[in-house]
Amino acid sequence: MITGSVNSIETMGLVDGPGIRTVVFLNSCFLRCKYCHNPETWKMGKKNMTTDEVVKKVLRSKPYFKNNGGVTFSGGEPLLQEEFLLECCKRLKAEGIHIALDTAGYTTDNVEEILKYVDLVLLDIKHTSKEGFKALTGGNKDIQDKFIEQLNKSGKKVWIRQVIVPGIMDNNKYLESLVKTIKEIKNVERIDFLPYHKLGREKYIRMNINYPLEDTPEMDKDKCNKLYEEFMKMYKKKSCLK
């Protein structure tokens, strides 16, 4: 039995994959995304739950999953607790549970074994350029790119998530680069634009952490929807050309 650091477990989730889902938020993340709304998951923290406890918690909600629900492992960066995550996935897959992984792929570990037990990857695209990735997250885009190589080899289904921050992603130049980036990822079933919001700002205040985007306005949802429409035109046009 393995013990991991779990920040929280939410039931009846509707936005972290298909159907009704139990979402397990694991602690630890090496990135410091300026728009992160879960700063409480950055540090590993105490190991407070066993794989048995997580599996039992998820299985209690199994009657609600029906045909397309399941469990989503999120964070933080869930891949940073590789051994714990792998054991949870093995146990839940044996119970016939659909498993989604919400990740930025920010790990230097080989994740081939974990991906064997995952049905869907929710991949968070931080930025399309190395410079932009570094400025926005403090991290190295090469690490995410290596994960994408492993993801492509796995053949797993992928949903893309892109947070749209005003002044950074809300322009055609970025959208064109995003089309090019996503075209390099296999088995993409869905692409979501998530408008930047400040709902996590109060957490920063309580934790006495500087909020990096204090002077950045929230992304207007209508404008975000229009950007998505423009993006999809570019994306479909690129598909036709190929």
Image: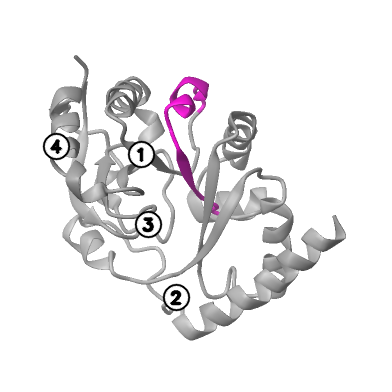
User: Mark 2, residues whose alpha carbon is within 10 Å: few (<14), some, or many (≥20)?
Assistant: some
Q: Name the residue at the front extreme.
A: 67
Q: Mark 2 to mark 1: distance in Å?
A: 37 Å
Q: Are marks 2 and 1 in contact (CB under 8 Å)?
A: no
In-front residue for pair 114/141: 114
Q: Mark 3 to mark 2: distance in Å?
A: 14 Å
Residue identified by numbered label 1: 98
- Horizontal side of 177 relative to 113 (left or right) equals right
Whole-percent x and y of residue 117?
42, 27
Q: Can you tell which mark lies on residue 216?
A: 2
Q: Secondary structure at mark 2?
A: loop
**Label whose residue precedes the other's in the sequence (2 or 1):** 1
**Label whose residue precedes the other's in the sequence (3 or 2):** 3
| Residues in magenta, as a range | 108-126
Query: Identity of the amino acid at label 4?
Result: Lys
Query: Identity of the amino acid at label 1?
Result: His
Image quarter (top left, top right, bottom left or bottom right) of the N terminus: top left
Q: Are marks 1 and 4 in contact (CB under 8 Å)?
A: no
For the rendered model, the colour scheme is one colour
Q: Secondary structure at mark 1?
A: strand
**Label whose residue precedes the other's in the sequence (3 or 1):** 3
Q: Within the image, what quadrant is residue 156 found in?
A: top right
Whole-percent x and y of residue 194?
46, 67
Q: Mark 4 to mark 3: distance in Å?
A: 26 Å
Q: In front: mark 4 or mark 3?
A: 4
Q: Are marks 4 and 3 in contact (CB under 8 Å)?
A: no
In-front residue for pair 166/234: 234
Q: Mark 1 to mark 4: distance in Å?
A: 15 Å
Residue identified by numbered label 3: 36
- Horizontal side of 148 relative to 179 (left or right) equals left
